[in-house]
């Protein structure tokens, strides 16, 4: 891989151009990392690569060693691992709520206590997510509850 950086005082906005023979896992991971800097996430839907604003994401979920993220109407697959996302999102309104889910706390409509010291979070789209016991303290702190 060759990286070229060219400084130009006349440029008003930084632009990143990727020229490649084909997309591979390494390149997808690099794009995912870059997109988080600009508050977007790179995801795949079929053969299409999409750049989705973080504010539109309801939650990230790991299923069968693959990470998916969900918006109000779409599902996308991404190459980053959940632990990598957790590290990058630790100072944001995203928080891990279970072993396999990181949720956007801004998309919580309500939370409700359940049996076994768990919480159920209802999202703005009506979907319900279970908050595991070990994550309740952090969730309540971030939510100010």
Image: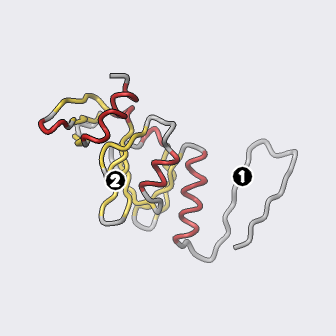
**Where residue 63 sits in the image (x, y, percent)?**
30, 61
**Callout in the foreground (1, 2):** 2
Query: Which residue occupies 64% across, 72% down?
Result: 20
Name the quadrant containing residue 23.
bottom right
Snapshot quadrant of residue 4: bottom right
- Comparing 15 with 97, the one in front is 97
Q: Left or right: 121 with respect to 26?
A: left
Image quadrant where one finds the C terminus: top left
Q: Residue at x 30, y 47 (%)?
A: 98
Residue that numbered label 2 is attached to: 61
Residue under the image location 50 percent in, 50 percent down: 41
Q: Position of residue 38 (x, y in %)?
A: 60, 44
Dot 2 falls on a residue whose secondary structure is: strand
Check disc 1: other Cα within 10 Å, few if <14, some if 14-19, many if 20+. few
Q: In the figure, is residue 59 to the left or right of 92? A: left
Disc number at residue 97?
none
Query: Marks 1/2: CA distance?
Result: 30 Å
Residue located beneath label 1 in the image: 15
User: Around disc 2, counting alpha carbons within 10 Å, would you say few (fewer than 14), some (14 to 19), or many (20 or more)?
Assistant: many
**Quadrant of the image containing the N terminus:** bottom right
Placement of 90 over or under 19, stated as above or below: above
């Amino acid at each position: 891989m060759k990286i070229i950086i060219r400084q130009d005082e006349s440029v008003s906005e930084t632009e990143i151009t990727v020229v490649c023979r084909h997309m591979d896992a390494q390149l997808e991971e690099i794009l995912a990392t870059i997109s988080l800097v600009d508050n977007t996430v790179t995801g795949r839907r079929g053969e299409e690569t999409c750049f989705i604003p973080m504010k539109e994401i309801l939650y990230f979920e790991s299923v069968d060693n693959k990470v998916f993220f969900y918006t109000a109407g779409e599902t996308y697959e991404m190459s980053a691992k959940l632990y990598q996302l957790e590290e990058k999102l630790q100072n944001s309104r995203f928080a891990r709520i279970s072993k396999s889910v990181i949720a956007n706390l801004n998309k919580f409509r309500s939370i409700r206590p359940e049996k076994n010291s768990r919480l159920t979070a209802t999202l703005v789209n009506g979907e319900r997510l279970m908050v595991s016991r070990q994550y309740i303290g952090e969730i309540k702190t971030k939510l100010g509850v």
